[in-house]
Image (spheres, rainbow, N blue to C red):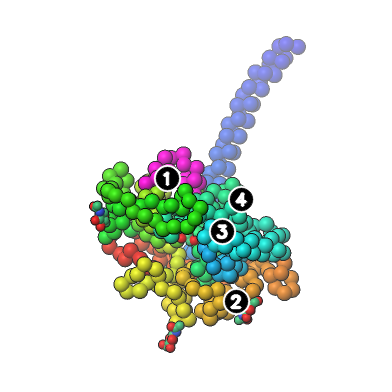
Amino acid sequence: MESTLNVERKRGFPVAIALLISLILCAISLNLEVFLSLTTINSIFWISPAVNHTSQFYVESKAPPVPPRFAYFISGTRGDLEKLWRTLQSLYHPWNYYVVHLELGSTLEERLELASRIDKDPIFNKVQNVLMITKANMVTYRGPTMVSNTLHACAILLKTYKHWDWFINLSASDYPLVTQDDLLHTFSGLKRNLNFIHHTSRLGWTGRAMPLIVDPGIYQNTKSDLFRVSPNRTLPTAFRLFTGSAWTVLSRSFVEYVIWGWDNLPRILLMYYTNFVSSPEGYFQTVICNSPEFVPTVVNDDMHFVSWDYPPKQHPRNLNINDTAKMIASNAPFARKFKRSRDIVLDKIDAELLGRENGSFTPGGWCSGNPPCSEVGNPTELIPGPGAERLTRLLARRVYSAEFTDRQCKVSVSWPLRGNE
Ligand SMILES: *[C@@H]1O[C@H](CO)[C@@H](O)[C@H](O)[C@H]1NC(C)=O
Ligand SMILES: *[C@@H]1O[C@H](CO)[C@@H](O)[C@H](O)[C@H]1NC(C)=O
Ligand SMILES: *[C@@H]1O[C@H](CO)[C@@H](O)[C@H](O)[C@H]1NC(C)=O
Ligand SMILES: *[C@@H]1O[C@H](CO)[C@@H](O)[C@H](O)[C@H]1NC(C)=O
Ligand SMILES: *[C@@H]1O[C@H](CO)[C@@H](O)[C@H](O)[C@H]1NC(C)=O
C-alpha cells in the first residue's frame, strides 16, 4: 500500500511540476496578452509627442470604453443662488457627481432654497449624485480659505463617491460651452491621470510671494478682508513657486495625493500658502510642479475661456453676447465669467451650443421620458455633438502635440500669465 502510494507520489511529482510549468506559462501568456492589449490601448490613446496621433484619436473600438466620471464642485457666494442653479442644470449628467456650496457670506434663505431645490428635484432624488455642503464654509476672496474650501469638496467627493476620474472646480459665474456628452466622450480617450493645471514659473509676480497676509475667514464667523502683516518673508528655497489659473481639472490620483498627504509636501505647501495672497492661483501649481512623479501628467491649460482687459485688471471681463464667437473659437469646454443668471449670452449658449431649454437639463444620450430628460435612460449612452469636435481640437493642441511636454513645469518660459493664449 505504502509503496504504491510512494510510486504514485513519485509519478505525481513530475506531473505536478509539468502542470505547474504549464500553468505558469499560461499565466505569463495571459498576462502578456493583457499587457499587450493594455499597451496597444495606451498607444492608441497615449501620446508620443513627435507623432501625429490626431487621426488615431478617432479610432472606434467595437466595445466602447466605459466613459470616465467627473466630480464637479460648484461654489458661490451671496446672491449666486440663481446663477449656481443654472450652471448646475446645464452641467448635469447622471453619470457624474456634483457637490455644491454657497459660502457663509450668502444668506440663510439662499442656502435653504438651494437645499430644498436639490431635495425636490425628481432626477437628483433618483440618481442621488448631487450633494450640498450644508455646513457652509467661510470663504474670503483671494484668501487661503478658498483653497481649503476646494480641498473640503475634494475630501467629500473622495469619501462619498468611490468611482470618479476627474475633479472639476467651478464657480457659479462659470458656464459650459460643450455638453457633458461631449466632455465624457472626448475624455474617454485620455489617460485618466492627466491634470489640467495652467501654470508658469515666470517671476514677474514675486511681489506677491513676499508679503504676508492673514485670512480672518479661518477663525472668524463674520466676513472681513485679508490683512497684511510685517515684516515680509523671503522667497522660498526649499521648493520652486509656480502660479497660474485657479481653475483646474484634477485627476483622482492627484486629488488623493493632495488630500491623503502621505507625502508631506502637499501639507507643507498648504501651510506655506496660508499666508500668501491669491493662494488659489498657486497652490496646486506649486504642489504638482514640485512632485516629480506628477510632472509628466500636467497639461498646461485650464480648460476655460476667460477674457481680460488690456492691461489686465483684478477681475476678468464679464462676458456678453459679443464674445460668443471668441468663446466658440477658443474650443474651451468652460467660460467665465457671467454676471447674471438671466442673460442673453447664456440663452445663446443654451440654444446654439448646448441645445438646452429654459429650466431644463442639457439634453444627452441619457435623457428619456416626456418631457425629455424627465427620466434617466442609459447614462453611458453618449451622443457627442459639435462640442466634442471643438474639444478634440483643443486636446490635439495641448495633449496630442509636442506642446504637452514642452510646457510641463518649465522654468521661466515666457507666455502670458493670464488668459488662454
Ligand atoms: C494630423 O492628422 C490629421 C488627420 O489625419 C490631420 O488633419 C492634421 O492636419 C495632422 N496634423 C499635423 C500637425 O500633421
Ligand atoms: C476653485 O473654484 C473657486 C470658484 O468657486 C475659485 O474661487 C477657487 O479659487 C478655485 N481654485 C482653488 C484652487 O481653490
Ligand atoms: C513687502 O513686499 C512688498 C511687495 O514686494 C513691498 O511693496 C513692500 O514694500 C515690502 N515691505 C517691507 C516692509 O519690506
Ligand atoms: C455688442 O456690439 C454691438 C455692436 O458693436 C454694440 O452696439 C453692443 O453695445 C455690444 N453689446 C454689449 C453688451 O457690449
Ligand atoms: C425661463 O424661465 C423662467 C422661470 O421659469 C422665466 O421667468 C423666464 O422668463 C424664462 N425665460 C425664457 C427666455 O423663456
Marks 2 and 4, Cα distance to the nearest angstrom?
Answer: 29 Å
Q: Earlier in the sequence, mark 2 or mark 1?
A: 1
Question: In this figure, which residue is indicated by the disc labeled 2?
Answer: 355
**What predominant SS class does the magenta segment belong to?**
helix
State the residue lying farthest toward the right. 1
Marks 3 and 4, Cα distance to the nearest angstrom?
Answer: 17 Å
When the figure is inspected, residue 323 is found, relative to residue 180, above or below; the finding is below
Q: For ligand 3, which image quadrant applies?
A: bottom left
Is 265 part of what is drawn in magenta? Answer: yes
Question: In this figure, which residue is indicated by the disc labeled 1?
Answer: 266
Q: Which label belongs to residue 101? A: 3
Around disc 1, counting alpha carbons within 10 Å, would you say few (fewer than 14), some (14 to 19), or many (20 or more)? many
Q: Which label belongs to residue 161? A: 4
When the figure is inspected, residue 341 is found, relative to residue 104, above or below; the finding is below
Image x and y of residue 85, in percent? 59, 67
What residue type is disc 4 on? Tyr
